[in-house]
Amino acid sequence: MVKQHAGFAEEQQSKFIDAGLADAAHGPSTDGGRFKIGPGGRVVIPADVRQALGVVEGDTLLATLVDGELRLQSPRLALRRAQAMVRAAIPAGVSLVDDLLAERRREVERDRLRGR
């Protein structure tokens, strides 16, 4: 079956995502797949790939070009990766919230002593 999307046909494609081979660091693995470049440089992302990414029509994907590879990720995945990077940079037992609150209390006390 061929679906039409804004003048670009989405051809039926074989199963792209093998959910059984997913890993937390890199997400579902792929068994390959071929995509045709359509008018205006458009590429149709197969439904099973969109489902694995957790995106629907109208959502925004983040794209990066790494070593000649085009990588697409959902904003939710990008946020989780950024949070993991921040967690890895904070020493164990350190609470940024507690540090921020203590700093704010010191500022309030300095302002109080200066008569502000």
Image: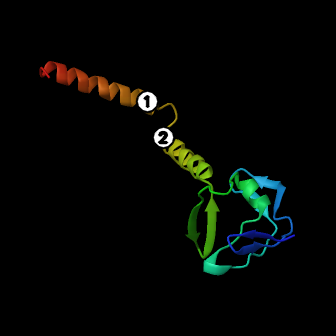
Identify whether 7 is placed above or below 98.
below
Can you tell which quarter of the image residue 35 is in?
Answer: bottom right
Q: How many angstroms separate mark 2 from mark 1 (CA)?
A: 12 Å
Which residue type does callout 2 highlight? Ile
Kind of element beneath mark 2: loop
Residue under label 1: 97
Q: Position of residue 76 (x, y in %)?
A: 61, 48
Residue appearing at x 56%, y 66% in the figure: 64
Number of numbered discs visible in the structure rendering: 2
Proximity of marks 2 and 1: CB atoms separated by less than 8 Å: no
Quadrant of the rendering where the N terminus is positioned: bottom right
Q: Position of residue 24 (x, y in %)?
A: 71, 50
Q: From the viewer's perspective, tell me whether residue 75 is left or right of residue 51.
A: left
What colour scheme was applied to this rendering of the protein? rainbow
Name of the residue lying farthest toward the left: 115
Can you tell which quarter of the image residue 66 is in?
Answer: bottom right
- Dot 2 crowding, Cα within 10 Å, few <14, some 14–19, many 20+: few
Q: Position of residue 108 (x, y in %)?
A: 24, 23
Residue appearing at x 46%, y 30% in the figure: 95
Mark number, residue 48: none
Q: Nearer the viewer, residue 34 or 104?
A: 34
Residue appearing at x 68%, y 79% in the figure: 38
Which mark is first along the chain, 1 or 2?
A: 2
Residue appearing at x 73%, y 79% in the figure: 36
Kind of element beneath mark 1: helix
Can you tell which quarter of the image residue 22 is in?
Answer: bottom right
Which residue type does callout 1 highlight? Val
